[in-house]
Image (cartoon, rainbow, N blue to C red):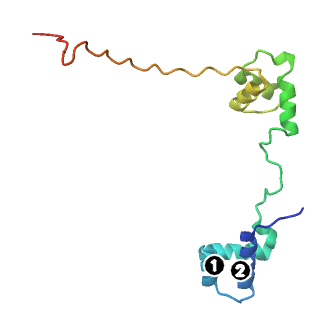
Amino acid sequence: MNLLYTDKQMNKVRIIQKLIDNKINIKDVCDALSCSERTVYRYKSTLINEGPPGFIHGLKGKVSNHNPYSSKHQDLDRIITQNKFIGFGPTFLSEKLLEIYGFYINKESLRKRMIRLGLWLPKPKKTVVKRKKRERSKSFGLLIQIDGS
């Protein structure tokens, strides 16, 4: 796997390596990296145990679990577009997928997926009824007398 380091990561590796070689002290490292002593000790331990790849995030270069084009999601699309599931709502379909295929998917995720595939129509948003304002009086300065007692 080809790992690409950012300038910030390489700078961090160089500074921690100087600390390991006793060329600078811990306070200088804290100032240079603007972090606490505890963090510097953790960085030092990471560099000693894992080397420079320890400063790269573990998921870098890997495919996301939420990739909508993965084979898992394509299988799900193929299953829910079968004729035997036509007319099922997201909640019931979610239960049936778990029961029949052992495949759990949240009902809201399934609802969004069904909307995207054209199998489910979202409810229309409610329109907010605004209160109608009182009509202006016909003459300037004229008030309506409601109760004279």
Point out the image quarter for the N terminus. Answer: bottom right
As shown in the figure, which amino acid type bears the numbered disc 2?
Ile
Residue 63 in the image: x percent, y percent?
83, 49
Residue 147 in the image: x percent, y percent?
15, 10
As shown in the figure, which amino acid type bears the numbered disc 1?
Ala
In the foreground, 98 or 20: 20
The residue indicated by pointer 1 is: 32
Q: Residues under labels 1 and 2: Cα distance? A: 8 Å
Q: Which mark is residue 52?
A: none
Q: Left or right: 54 with respect to 78?
A: left
Whether residue 111 is situated above or below residue 6 in the rendered picture = above
Whether residue 9 is situated above or below residue 110 in the rendered picture = below
- Taking the spot 78% from the left edge, 77% from the top edge, the residue there is 48
Residue 58 in the image: x percent, y percent?
78, 59
The residue indicated by pointer 2 is: 15
- Taking the spot 75% from the left edge, 87% from the top edge, the residue there is 21
Tag 1 secondary structure: helix
